[in-house]
Image (spheres, rainbow, N blue to C red):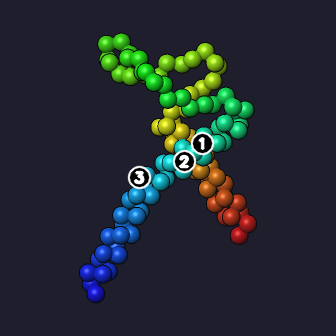
Amino acid sequence: MASIIFDLIALVLELVFWVVWAALPTVLYFTALALLFAATFGRVTIEFPETLSRIGWTGLLRITRKGEGRVILSPALGVIVGFVIWAVIVSAAIIVHAYRS
C-alpha cells in the first residue's frame, strides 16, 4: 500500500514539474502573442530566420531585422510578457475580490 502512495506522489510531482517547465511557458507565450498582435494591430510578428548573423568578436547569434517596420517577439520575451499579462489579470481579480468582501 505504501508503494502505491509513493508512486502516486511521484506521479503528481512529475506532472507539476512538467506543467511548470513545459506547459506554463507555452501558455504564457501564446497569450502574449495573441494579445500583443491584437493590441498592436499586427505590428508584432514572429520570425525564425533561416540564417543568423554573428555579433562582432563575441560570436553570439542575432536575428537580423527586416525593413518591414514590425517588431520581432522572441520566445523568451514572449514568456516574460505573457507572465506579466497574467500577473496583472490575477492581481486585478484578487484586488476586486478583496474589495467586494
Give x and y (percent) for residue 98. Answer: 67, 64
CA separation in Å, label 2 and label 3: 12 Å
Is there a contact, CB below 8 Å, between mark 1 and mark 3?
no
Residue 84's quadrant in the figure? Answer: top right
Residue 56's quadrant in the figure? Answer: top left
* Amino acid at dot 2: Leu
Q: Is residue 19 at all visible to an observer of this figure? A: yes
Q: Which structural element holds mark 1?
A: helix
Q: Is residue 84 at all visible to an observer of this figure? A: no
Is there a contact, CB below 8 Å, between mark 1 and mark 2?
yes
Above or below for 58 versus 73: above
* Amino acid at dot 1: Ala
* Residue at image point 66% right, 36% down: 37
* Residue at image point 35% right, 22% down: 60
Residue 57's quadrant in the figure? Answer: top left
Residue 32's label in the rendered image is 1
Judge from the rendering whether residue 6 lies leftward or rightward of residue 94; answer left or right. Answer: left
Residue 21's label in the rendered image is 3
Say which residue label 2 marks: 28
* Amino acid at dot 3: Trp
Above or below for 56 versus 70: above
